[in-house]
Amino acid sequence: MTHATPLSSSPSWIAWTGMETDLIFNKGVDLPEFAAFPMVDTAEGRERLQAYYEALIGIGRDTGVGVILDTPTWMANPDRASAVGYGAEDLPRVTRDAVALVRGVADKHPDVSALISVQIGPQGDGYKPGMAAHDAAATYHRPQIQAAKDAGADVVSAYTLGASGEAIGIASEAARIGIPALISYTVETDGRLADGTALSEAVETLHAAAAPAAIMVNCAHPDHLAEALDGGAWESKLTGFVANASRQSHAELDACETLDDGDPEELSQQLAALKAGHSGLRILGGCCGTDLRHLRATAKRML
């Protein structure tokens, strides 16, 4: 496995943050409170996770793209984990065990460029603004970031952030601890963050304050991102887009009882077009409603 500077070992990467919706709607797996990280603590859960990582590595091998392997720890913070019976004292161990599981798969495939990423989520609901104060966010997320560093993860990836303060706090704390950070905002159907901030402003503010290894957008459809794109110089600072399969709003997705998986080929075409028009985009992938079909179609078009 490659342990060079993050993102340097491949010109293009795929990432997947749609595991939960695939497990719930396609595999019939019960995920109380939408939390996937307890799977690390069961034999059946570990087997399912390992199969996903093997499949992602297979896509990387077949297409030549690099693969970002995220731990299932998006909800492994004190506020969200308490609902499924985990205390704050349990979570560093969960993070370390998750990294060990991913590394156990990745190390079998040294021919594929891969990054082991500890996925971090917002303190609360990803569809709401989140923490406004960057210093409070740094303190709050410090244990998970430190656990990622101690476990030997390559990067931390903070997804579905709706406020600049929380993004800056995570990126700054990761820099202080000494692990690269991939920071991803989410936008509403109007292309703005949940707190109303324009994506352009959020990207510029984060870049100036912390300059993480990547600034991305996730949990939105390409049509929603298009509402934010204005041709400004800030767009060159976007490194990735991990898209929803569905054009539905976050509120609609929250209330949805059936999975809207869109059209894998159409989504891959839209993502490829975005990459062609934005030279800084190096990470593409799938979020809610996507599965391995979407990822394979996207990876094929990336190169």
Image: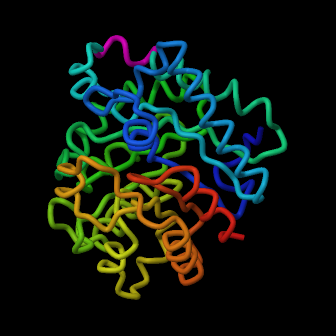
Q: Would residue 276 be counted in the magenta stretch?
A: no
The figure's colour scheme reads rainbow
Q: Which quadrant is home to the C terminus?
A: bottom right
Characterize the magenta stretch by its predominant secondary structure. Answer: helix
| Residue 115 shows in this picture | yes
Q: Is residue 282 above or below residue 181?
A: below
**Left or right: where does residue 138 sit relative to residue 210?**
left
On the image, the x and y values in percent for residue 246 come to 35, 63
On the image, the x and y values in percent for residue 236 come to 49, 76
At a point 21% along the width and 49% down the height, the residue shown is: 254
Residue range of the region highlighted in magenta in the rendering: 88-93
At a point 47% along the width and 44% down the height, the residue shown is: 157
**Left or right: where does residue 183 sit relative to residue 256?**
right
At a point 31% along the width and 78% down the height, the residue shown is: 228
- Residue nearest the observer in this picture, 116 or 6: 116
Q: Determine which quarter of the picture holds residue 206.
A: bottom left
Kindly give the residue lying farthest to the right in the view shown. Answer: 111
On the image, the x and y values in percent for residue 136 come to 22, 37
